[in-house]
Image (tube, rainbow, N blue to C red):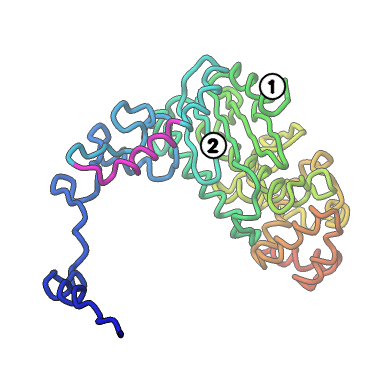
Amino acid sequence: MTPIPSVAPLILSLLLPSHQDESPPAHDTCGACDDRGWFACNRHDETEVELEANTRFCSYVAGCPDCRGTLEVDCSDCALGDRRVADARAEQDRWMEGMQEHWDRFHHDFPIGQSDHFLLFWSGDKITVKRERLSDHEAMHLYVERLEDLFERFKAVTAAEDDDFSTLFHVMVWKRFAHNRLASEHYTNQPNPNVTGTKRMGAVGIYTVHIDPSYVDPDESASADLYRAIVHNVTHLLLANVWDARWPGQLKGGWIDAGLAHYFEHVLHRRCTNFCYREQDTVATFKGGRWRAPVKKLANKRNRPSFVETATKKTTELTLEEHALVWSYCEFLIATDPKGFGEICKAIKRGESYRDALKEHFDLTPLTFEDAWKRHVKTFKD
């Protein structure tokens, strides 16, 4: 006998309501926080919030008992932001725990800020910039901004990309010489720092500096001198790390190592006053670091060092005259073709001759370079 199919499922489907057209249940909503799950921390005004925009971490706000550096407090009326706020606080807490060893080492609390490419220790106290007095916290953020600006400028004149760098650069500014000495010993392995600080270059980029106002030129301010010193020396760190973590200054590439550092220094104030490894008196000669007019005269001197001679020296071998010349060489090439200049930097860092890159990207030989450079230098205005 053929079984009779049951009609019960059909009857049940007709009697029970259908769920096919139902909308999914609405998610939780909160009128108190407009579904954000958090409120802005009321311990920080709008000016301070804007200040924090250029750092990922700042020890000043990370010490806030309410938001612990996130600038947010959890909404107590809902759970919409619980996980995100908790994760952000945990990240801030981990960073602060990592910074504690530095404060312990110096027995001294000072603002520390971390941006995308730099970790900055600011123990430089208050500073005056354009007649405005800045707190140590504000000064730290100003220099984070200045460092990131230098990073972007460096990429622009070398055609480097973010991925070409392999470290978080450390910059340390100290009001007290004793702190700079301790930092030099611990972080750069150099126990006897000079007035412009010490560096550790290559895979690890670290610069520590103390500016003694008594060493600053009479016609200069300590704040401007510090700014140029940081720009000059951090440029060395960037060039030594980019692409391959090799310092060209010891690979007979002193002309790009010193020249590029002077280039960015000169961009700031049209003045170069920082030198590596050799004391130079720029006040007595070369117009206190103002180099356009002296280089213009040098170009016509028969007994000046040639480009070929200078382009094979290490940074430590350059004379004052050659420092001014290598600045002008880099300035000329960057003005002509930044990408081509970057290719020359890459070649030198690989231990290769600059000549092939100079020919490929500028269609110049070392001899024809001299003529093209002279034409460029003639355009300099005092």
Picture quarter with the N terminus: bottom left
Vertical side of 196 occupied by 35: above or below: below
Q: Is residue 377 visible?
A: no
Q: Secondary structure at mark 2?
A: strand
Position of 321 compared to 79: left or right? right
Q: Secondary structure at mark 1?
A: helix
Amino acid found under the numbered disc labelled 2:
Leu
Position of 121 compared to 232: left or right? left
Q: Which residues are magenta?
A: 78-93
Q: Are marks 2 and 1 in contact (CB under 8 Å)?
A: no
Residue 21 x/y as whole percent: 18, 73
Picture quarter with the C terminus: bottom right
Residue 336 x/y as whole percent: 67, 67
Vertical side of 298 occupied by 16: above or below: below
Q: Is residue 31 visible?
A: yes
Number of numbered discs: 2
Q: Give the farthest residue toward the top.
A: 107
Figure quadrant of residue 104: top right
Most common SS among magenta residues = helix
- The local crowd at label 1, few if under 14, some if 14 to 19, many if 20 or more residues have their Cα within 10 Å, is some
Q: Residue at x 43, y 30 (%)?
A: 93
Q: Residue at x 47, y 44 (%)?
A: 145
| Nearer to the camera, 163 or 127 | 163
Vertical side of 17 occupied by 328: above or below: above
Disc on res. 185: 1
Residue located beneath label 2 in the image:
119
